Image (tube, rainbow, N blue to C red):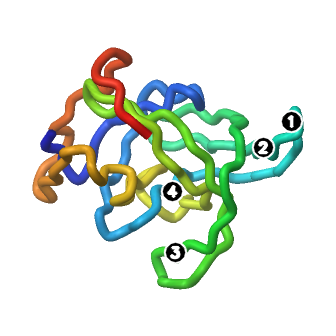
Amino acid sequence: MLIGWRERIALPELGIDLMQAKIDTGARTSALHATKAVRFQRDGAEWVRFHIPHASGLAARDCEAPLIDRREIKNTSGLGEDRLVIETLLLLGGRRWRIEVSLADRSAMAMPIILGRTAIRKRGILVDAGKSYLAGLPRPTGGQGKP
């Protein structure tokens, strides 16, 4: 599958049917713009509640997801930040698979999410850095990827 440096994706488990994503092979971990993250317990498991602010065509929303990790991740300046990490379903073109996403303040960035190289590794995906929107719109049907 050939994709561009910018693609349209969906994160249906977070209620996001369509959003722009930057494909960033220089970043290891994917990052989603989120604010007001609060950890809480649900049925003995740790969860996180967070807010996704309004961004270019994306309506603001409150989300909840199981917390899978807390990691130190380097930001765009190369400084380590302590971030909460969730796992969610990604739809890209006609394909779907689960990815790990860190929650970060990306308010200074042009796109609300970056997909890092671990999100696309071992998926048969090539990135054409000179093109955009090669995958088409995310479709809920298609091949089920393995986590």
The reply, left or right, for residue 80 in relation to residue 63 is left
The disc label shown at residue 31, or none: 4
Q: Secondary structure at mark 3?
A: loop
Say which residue label 3 marks. 75
Task: Specify the amino acid type for callout 4.
Answer: Ala
Q: CA distance from mark 4 to mark 3?
A: 10 Å
Asked which quadrant contains residue 25, the reply is bottom left
Residue type at the position of mark 1: Arg
Q: Is label 1 in contact with label 2 (beta carbons under 8 Å)?
A: yes
Task: Say which label, 4 or 3, has the lower sequence index.
Answer: 4
Q: Residues within 10 Å of mark 1 (few under 14, many from 20)?
A: few
| Label 3: how many Cα within 10 Å (few below 14, some 14–19, many 20+) | some
Quarter-wise, where is residue 92 in the image?
Answer: top left
Tell me if label 2 and label 3 are in contact, CB under 8 Å.
no
- Percent position of residue 59, x then y: 57, 32
Task: Point out residue 3 in the picture as x, y percentages from the top left corner.
Answer: 18, 44
Q: If you read the primary sequence from the N terminus, does the residue marked by circle 1 or circle 2 appear first?
A: 1
Quadrant for the C terminus in the image: top left
Q: Earlier along the polypeptide chain: callout 3 or callout 1? A: 1
**Label 4 to label 2: alpha-carbon separation:** 17 Å
- Kind of element beneath mark 1: strand
Alpha-carbon span between mark 3 and mark 1: 30 Å
Q: Which residue is mark 2?
A: 47
Which of label 3 and label 1 is nearer to you? 1
Distance, label 1 to label 2, CA atoms, is 7 Å
Which residue in the protein does label 1 denote? 42
Of circles 1 and 4, the one toward us is 1
Tell me the CA gap for discs 2 and 3: 23 Å
Q: CA distance from mark 1 to mark 4?
A: 24 Å
SS class of the residue under badge 4? strand
